[in-house]
Amino acid sequence: MLITDNNLVHLEKFIISNSNRAIKFSDRFCIDSRKVKSGQIFISIDSDESKNFKNIKNAIFNGASGFVTQFLYKRSDLKTSIPFLIQKNLDNLFHMLFNVDLIGYKHKVKTIGITGTNGKTSSVLLLAQSLTYLKKKVGVITSEGCGIYPALVDSDYTTPPIDIIYKYYRNFVSKECDYIIIECSSQGLHQGRVKGLLFDYACITNIHSDHLDYHKTIKNYSNSKLSILNQSKKAILNYDSSILMKNNFDKYRNLECFYFSKSRYTNKKIISRHMKDNKILINKHVVTFDKANKNHFNIYSLLMICSILKLENYGLKLINSSITALCELPGRRQVIRTRSKGTFIIDYAHTIQSFRDIYKEFKSYNHITTLFGCGGDRDPSKRAVIGKIVDSNSSFSIITEDNSRNENLSSIVNNISSGFNDKKRYIVIKSRKTAIKYLFTYSSKKHINFILGKGNESYLIKNSSKVKHNDIIYLNNLINNYES
């Protein structure tokens, strides 16, 4: 059944006729039965019929004035007198309702979606920094927070649910933002959380194996990432990502592809490439960024940003100055140096490739200690591999907690430790605070210490609760107390 304007008009009329009045049309309905308010229409979009029925009952209990579903129910089964509408292909239609609120705005905004296994959040924030430096107003939706950069409000999601995405999007358009940058997770893309949005640029930082607990296979995971290309005008892709570049991009209609790379390929669509001595070649012009190396930014993030700015017709001098002005991101390859306790490097690294990359970036022949863990209720197959990488790059290691969630920490530790060749080269300290304190106590002037996994996060997830903790704050308190 093809979706027609009549379907949408019919759905709009039902919502308007059976809901309380609201300033915005999207405030008249809700897609989460737990958040339905009295007088709202509940749009039941779950593809599972039994879950759909359960959600409808929950929405009615919470005061819904009506509901829309794609399944055929009898009023006697629902035991309710409120109006409801049966709408086929609802999953392909409901997202259009959010666009109703955007129709009245004449302001045009450029929308950028960034996805990839590693570097999504960093790339979003660094790009927002660059564009803000260039006097542009930038709306940001990312795991680090949402809002008009740099005033971000904490978020519980990498890619929020679709209703939250559209409310932020609507706010950014109303505030006349020049750009909107959205961090797109594989789960978010697979679940349609950015459905209906048209991206001016889709950027893919890389694709490595990850989140197989959710996607099951690397192919499914890769396809989720690539699905962003179906709703994009231009793509900016990492030419060095082997899994990414195995795909045929010609099948994406009306999509123009550009690339960035660290290698010397002859492809004319490669806009920016990395050269020696911290130089970036943008088309045929060389730009040097000294500070970029000093702050240890991921070179691929810089290449991607240069590519976007070039495609947006910024001159080389402006690109150079905006990249040079970038500030270090808390918890992302953050370097903390001390007078007598060595150097500490804090990072969010939690994937196999991100562990490999950070050791390569900060290659050292000094005594290296790594403090790390792996998340519970997530892909257990990567834990031994990460353990092996840590073991081969560290003089000594401390295995500790990292969002164990509902999984027993001992099972996580057993998975990790199976990757170590020498069981005497690591210890297990369950408490992350105690582990960091131990690391700091026994560190000396020439030691390099990696604290990986949590970055600048402000909590640990244990069971279903969040426990307040921040690696950076706790480490700085130890340093200040010691050095004072």
Image (cartoon, rainbow, N blue to C red):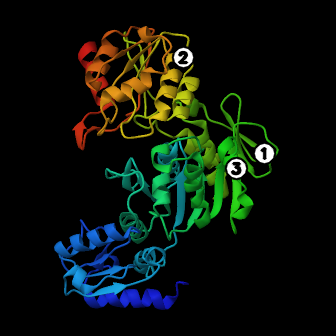
- Quadrant for the C terminus, please: top left
Mark sitting earlier along the chain (3/1)? 3
**Quick one: SS at disc 3?**
strand
Residue 165 percent location from the top left of the image: 40, 63
Q: Position of residue 211 (x, y in %)?
A: 48, 44
Label ID, residue 259: 3
Q: What residue would you read off at disc 2?
A: 392
Label placed on residue 184: none
Q: Is residue 231 above or below residue 329?
A: below
Tell me the kind of residue under disc 2.
Ser
At a point 39% along the width and 8% down the height, the residue shown is: 444
- Residue at horizontal 62 percent and vertical 53 percent from the top: 308
Give the residue number, with chain letter if any, for mark 1.
284
Give whichever of discs 2 and 3 has the lower sequence position: 3
Q: Nearer the viewer, residue 308 or 367?
A: 367
Of residues 360 and 29, the one drawn nearer to the viewer in this rendering: 29
Q: Nearer the viewer, residue 423 or 256?
A: 423
Position in image of residue 409 (x %, y %): 31, 29
